[in-house]
Image (tube, rainbow, N blue to C red):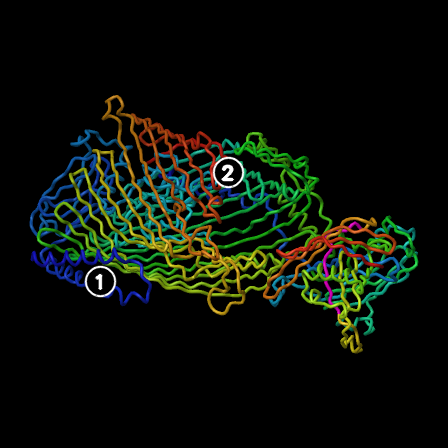
Amino acid sequence: MKKFSIRIATLFLALSLFSCDKQKDGLETPLADFPQVIRLADEGDGDLEDEDKFSFKISLSDRKDPDGDELGGKVVPLEQDVLVSFEVTGFEGFTQLSDFILGAEAFYEIDDCITSLDQGIDLNLTFDVNTGKGQVRFPAGIEEIEIEFETDDGLFDDNDFNTDERSITIQLTGIGATSENVVVNTSGEFVYEVQDDEGIYGEWELDVNDPVAFARFKELFGLINEDILSLDASEVDEITLVFEFEEVKAIVKLVETEIVDDCGSPSVENKEIEIEAEIEELSDDALSGDVEFGELIELGGGLFREFVYKGVFSITGSTLTIELEGEYGDDSTDAIVLTLEK
Amino acid sequence: MLLVCLRAYKYCFCFVNAGLRCVNFVRHRFALKYKKMKSSFFSCLLLALIFSVTADAQQVLVKGRVHDKATGEPLAGATVSVLNANLTTVTDLNGRFFMYMQAKTQQVQFTYLGYRDTTIQVDPATIDGRELRIEMTTGVVQLSGVVVTGFMKGQVKALNQQKNADNIKNVISADQIGRFPDPNAAEALQRVPGVNIERDQGEGRYVLVRGLAPQFTNININGEQIPSPEADVRFVALDAVPSDQLASIEVSKTLTPDMDGDAIGGSVNLITRTAQSTKLQVSSSLAGGYNNLMKKGNVQGQLQFGQRFGQQGKTGLLVNSSYYHNDLGSDNLERAFDDNELELRDYELTRTRLGLSSTLDHRFNANHEVYLRGLYNRFTDREWRRRYVFKPEDDEIEKLTKDRFEAQSITTINLGAKHTFKSFFLNYEGQYSYGEQNTPYDNEIGFIADLASTIQAGDPKFPGIQAAGYTDNTNYELDEAGFGNTLAKDRNLTAKFDLGIPYKINKNNGLLKLGMKWRQKTKSFSITQDYYSPIAGIPDLSNFDEDPIKSSFMKGRYEMGRPLSVASFIRYFNANPAEFEAELEDKAIDEALEAYDAEENVYAAYLMTRQQLRKAVLVAGLRYERTKVNYTSSDVVIDGAGDLQDIIPVSGSSVYDFLLPQVSLRYPLSASTNLRASAVFSYARPNFGEIIPAQEINQEDEEATAGNPALKPVSAFNGDLLAEHYFGNAGLLSGGFFYKRLTDFIYRRVLFNSPYPLTGTPYINSINVIQAQNGNDADLLGFELAFQHHLGFISPGLKPFSLYLNYTYTNSEARIQSRNASASDPNAIEKLRLPGQASHVGNISLAYEKKRFTARASLNFNGEYLSEIGGAPDEDVYVKDRLQLDFSASMALTAKWRLFVETMNLTGQPFEVFMGDKTRLIQREFYSWWGRLGVKFDF
């Protein structure tokens, strides 16, 4: 009996000890120490076809703020310099890379007025305009570097509306040796698009002296901006609507001026009221189509309200006719037609 | 003397009446409003003490133990009466009793259902402090003529304890638990009248007593509350406790002042086993089983050693261990009607339950003993959840897999002693208990496809889905990967003592009892939660899929395709971290919002009397409990754009006092019939999730949810009236009414256009704040019926059959702020039923027992109940009514070996939830049936 009991007990204890709770079965544990990731800061940019330069930025992914100040995390700079390789992995609308890109330089911002170039800091950029391959030093202690390409501003500049794509694609391809826990994202792409200024892109001007056009503009954008709503035509010097890469701006240049300190060089400039919005939809491959843009407006105290403008446009020669309905919270406008000139 | 008695009774009634008027009072009101009442009450007690002192000099202590003559087993719950002396007591779980008798020779009668009444002559002078040994024999009894068989003894024991208890309670013995196929304590409790359970994956988990949600019932092990391993709540998931660890379960429906006062529904006490015999007793069981849905097996085993050592068996040691391994799963369908979404969920689980318990006790002599009881339970749950989420409005379909491991453990250590002196007894105990829920990993990977889908409304039970290509994994790209781990800890330190002083008023014996308790609770929750989203370059889902776990889902009604393998994905993640970016804001929000620390100190004291009034036993007294709580957590502020604006550390505290008058009366109409009545005040503390100051202020949604540290506990008056009749050795017919009035009922209230924070200088002028608040009350009325008996009274041929029936009806009405309330009419009131209250709850169990064979078919039924109060009446969530059929049978192969088979959920009853009305089914979960076959032996 005693022996039997001991055997049973041993068997049971063994069963219990090796109890199969499957805690480890097929388990893969995710990285405990997630590395620093060097990556492209943006997925793309674009500018008009007569632009003579474009740039892309290399940055680091946000990490948890060691000081706990930035709740959503922040870029924590590297502790060692690292070499980052990049490459033009594709282009459309031209045959040779060197036809478009003439040269390159790399820099980073020290403050709003000074860059590393101003300080004579060399980021050891190398770039072959024939192969499209390059390498640059990402310095320790820096959050972001920018590589700017000089381009041939005459290559695409014509008077035709082009529907074919004209673009250039850049990817990061690797990093040099480092003892830091840092990796590079090689799958992300930066695509620079050449925008046709015969289409919707570019700057369109409203005739401020046309009281009907001015009233319509006030009604449309006064919905979201009280300053615009209370404007008198005599106070306005110029009104433009600017379509840029993924962004629309409505800029009201006032007659009133102010002194602007532009990096130590004071100048007298007109005051401006500017409305910016993100493009949600835009038929940019046609001379007429749909348009929708919107944004959140901060009301203070952490409160926001969203506005959306939605409608259609058509371009005839240098004239843009755009019909928009605005919504701002519970407020809205009827469909309002604006006519603007390039 | 008569005058003094009358005065004492008058004072006692005074304090009861005063107590009925007011129980719950906040601290600052206490001194003024109840000064008079306190004064009366303590005068009463002082008088009682004087009586006791005068009586002590004439009384002597007599102790004894009652055994079954044939087996030597102790008989718990036996009635011990001194004839012609209005003095009765009841044996404890170990068959022991003590009483203070007059110092003269008297007749003492021992009665026990199913046993012959035994009367002996006791002369205290000749006993000389020794423990009496009384042996009772089974046999023909006056009422039923049924002889107790070995297999019925557990039931008899339970009924005896129930019959002789001072309060209204149900007792289930280990033998009785073993008669039903219930592997954990929650499932064992579902057989008790008035008890309903909440299930998880088909297995019982939480207990709802008398139509009240789990937070209204406290859970004890060996008489002391245990901490909850879960983060936000106080109640305990009883699927962590194996039923074969237990000697018995007591469900007290009414309280006495020596019990914790924080129970409105009831108080559940899980009692572990103690060694009884000087012979080594070994019992064990081993079973293997099968889950029909998963086509997988399960294993269950239990082993117990118990023996008393030394010349007189002064030292006892019992060790019990059990292990349960179950591979289970479910097929689940969920709908969100408002969002027009549908989910298919395929669950695969592995659950284990390990239980270890031990009792070491030493009896120095008949009057003094010490004990050390320990219990450790570990419940693990590895879960894979594979699902689709169809979102026709967004033209999106999500495909996700979750892989999570969770281990809940409960440890309790009780060290105590019992001393019986010539004129009083003293019991004291210290307890350490610790509950933990450790989730070392909780990983969920979500992919998403831009695919159109249509949910067809034709069949509400199995809505059709049209979604071309949804099982084609090449359509899915990564949405988000989440990796988390959490740790919830809850620790109790408790110290208490009970002092009992016998006294006598005329010929009526009484016992004055007083005691104190201190309990310190520390509870915390910590979480690490990482989210990663793709930067670019991550392959589609077809690169991470695996074989399905089973060949069909919901009997082939829906296609699940090849599921996502979390392990495969994490291997890719680890090899290619550069393709991911951390979502740090989501991490910060989750971690700050959920983590908290709390400390709670409870100070309690009571004074009560157990007064014999001829046949009747009156238990009356007063319990005082003070609770001091401190919390720290964080406010999370999300701005109007949906971005994290701020995380602000906050702290809170609260203090509340309760003075709880409690009166119970048991009046035996005959030896087999009791009439019981009780009026008891009690309360229930709020869940931690409701009171910790953690807040989420979401200005994008213009809505804030805020904890409420000032939340008062729910207080209640509980009135009970019950009649019970016991049939000989194994039968019962009982019926009774109960009424509960809950004040300061806690509900979720919307404070429209409120400044925020609610106190102090607001930094938000207007926002809708959702907060648990007091202020409304609720009534609950119900009746319970219970019947258990063999069917021999119908016809002798039916004698092998027995019936176990119980039924509970409840009706409730809670008054809350109307969901139609608005800023212009914020105090509009709405009536609804209490969450957790099912109108009908019951059990029907038919057993056949003859010679060596027993078989039992058991039906457990619960009506629909409100599970969650929604934002509007048509958003209220109800758990649908449910009827589960189980079957068990056993055959005694020899006197020591028994073969058994148990099958559960034979009709494949699903778990179903609806919103608003029954046609809007929002969840249906199917489990099929499962069972096991095994052997038990006792040496």
Q: Which residues are magenta?
A: A272-283
**What type is the residue that disc 1 sits on?**
Met
User: Tag on residue B920?
Assistant: 2
Picture disc at residue B697: none
Return the disc, 1 or 2, that comes first in the chain's sequence: 1
Determine crowd level at label 2: few under 14, some 14-19, many 20+ residues with C-alpha closer than 10 A: some
Specify whether residue A275 is painted magenta.
Answer: yes
Residue at numbered disc 1: B37
Question: Could you say which is closer to the camera, residue A15 or residue B548?
Answer: B548
Q: Quadrant of the C terminus of chain B?
A: top left
Check the image and report above or below for A114 versus B852.
below
A186 or A245, nearer to the observer: A245
- The picture places residue A243, in percent across and down from the top left corner, at 79, 58
Does the segment drawn in magenta span residue B202? no
Total labels drawn: 2
Q: Position of residue B496 (x, y in %)?
A: 29, 59
| Element under disc 2 | loop
Q: Residues within 10 Å of mark 1 (few under 14, many from 20)?
A: some
Q: Is residue B310 above or below residue B35?
A: above
Q: Position of residue A301 (x, y in %)?
A: 59, 66
Subunit bearing disc 2: B
Q: Is residue A138 left or right of residue B210?
A: right
Tell if the residue under mark 1 belongs to the same chain as the one under mark 2. Answer: yes
Q: Which quadrant would residue B609 be assigned to in this image?
A: bottom left
Which one is nearer the viewer's eye here, B130 or B184?
B184
